[in-house]
Amino acid sequence: MGEFTPEAAEALKAAEAVCGPLELEEITNRRGSAVWKATGPRGSASIKIGTDEAAEVTAREASVLDQLPGYAVTAGRFDNGVWYVTPWLSGPSTWQVFRPMRKGEGGREEALAAAVGLCRAVADLHGAGWVHGDLQPQHGVHGEDGTVRLLDFAWSRKTGTTPWTRFDGTMIHLTSPELAARIMTGPQPCCRAVARALPFRSPAAPPPVLGGPRPDSRSGAVQSSP
């Protein structure tokens, strides 16, 4: 695990304003983007730091969080990077909720409820005039009350706008070629991605159509789902 970037000391002060005296845990660190979890007696916060090419992506995500209802963010810059602090979202990811079903250990009702919650969260985002742009099974957080919160808005944009000249988001197997070609035009890519992001099986496998016909991948025939 890496060391916390000393140049981003102001980020620690912003996190302390949320958590109080804090402890840090590194969550991810790749391609110039690091996420730390800050935990203290008053709560938890996420600290994201982007350096070099990831700096402007991080700044753009902070700007999106600042505009979305229900989110709070504090952001700043240092020599070659950008940081932001936002309250930590507690709860399992969509990937984690679906784990028992993938393993054949039950969990069907919980998975269906989680799927509905994720779809509602994406619908609310679209209703507010935004496209997520990078939906993945890890980008939905399921609260105890059933509410789903989305995260990782680095490639989000208002419908009809394109605030970046190069798109490096999403997982290739979650986006069909025809939608990838239209990825700047509207919410359709999110609709495809949310279906692929529901991890009934491995991310590379097509999701089943529950209660309806499904294609037989070996012959192209249509079978009835159990």
Image (tube, rainbow, N blue to C red):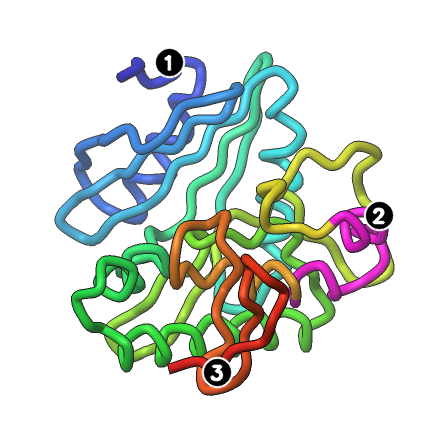
Residue sitting at 53 percent across and 59 percent down?
A: 206
Amino acid type, callout 3: Ser
In the rendered structure, the answer to whether residue 143 lies left or right of residue 157 reads: left
Disc 1, SS: helix
Q: Which residue is tagged 1?
A: 6
Residues in magenta, as a range: 177-191
Dot 1 amino acid type: Pro
Q: Is label 3 or label 1 in front?
A: 3
What residue appears at the point 54 percent right and 66 percent down from the top-left corner? 216
Return the residue nearer the eye: 122 or 43.
122
Residue depicted at 31% across the width and 33% down the height: 27
- Res. 90 visible in picture: no
Pinpoint residue 85: horizontal percent, then vertical percent.
Answer: 43, 41
Residue on which the image places disc 3: 224
First in sequence, mark 2 or 1: give its number: 1
| Residue 78 placement, left or right of 156 | left
How many angstroms separate mark 2 from mark 1 (CA)? 41 Å
Helix, strand or loop at disc 2?
Answer: loop
Disc 3 or 1, which lies upstream in sequence?
1
